[in-house]
Amino acid sequence: MKQLTSIEEMNEFVKQSGTHFLFKHSTTCPISAKAYDEFQAFVSDSDTSASVVYVIEHRIVSNQIADDFDIKHESPQVFLLEDGHVKWHTSHWKITKNALGEAFSS
């Protein structure tokens, strides 16, 4: 899983064709830590393209995601992207391996 550290990297990831997950993670939040574990478990068990943005360390990238998608910033937060558009998103305790699988297969 690639960590996105610049707006350019984020734009390149988002504009890829196909289906991808983008996870916004706060390294200081226990809820985010649990959600990130669930996210990593899903990604490792599937053949899914995925990237992560650490929201504290790369706030400018995190803010750009909120602006580009016109979706209020939350963390943890996950986006399912399809051909550059948000197909599904959720945050906090709703980020589970099961929920990610259901979103991906729908």
Image: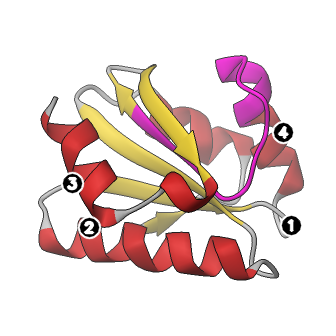
At x 63% / y 57%, what residue is drawn?
92
Where does label 2 land, which residue?
Answer: 42
Q: Earlier in the sequence, mark 1 or mark 4?
A: 1
- Are the residues at dot 2 and dot 3 in contact (C-beta closer than 8 Å)? yes
| SS of the residue under disc 1 | loop
Give the residues in magenta. Answer: 65-80
Say which mark, if any, is on residue 56.
1
* Distance of label 2 from label 3 (alpha carbons): 9 Å
At x 30% / y 64%, what residue is drawn?
97
Where does label 4 land, which residue?
Answer: 63
Percent from the top left, x then y, of residue 104?
Answer: 22, 40
- Quarter of the image for residue 32 reads bottom right
| SS of the residue under disc 2 | helix
- Type of amino acid at the residue the image marks with label 2: Phe
Say which mark, if any, is on residue 48.
3
Q: Earlier in the sequence, mark 2 or mark 3?
A: 2
Percent from the top left, x then y, of residue 80?
Answer: 39, 36
* Distance of label 1 from label 4 (alpha carbons): 10 Å
The one of 82 and 12 positioned closer to us in this rendering: 82
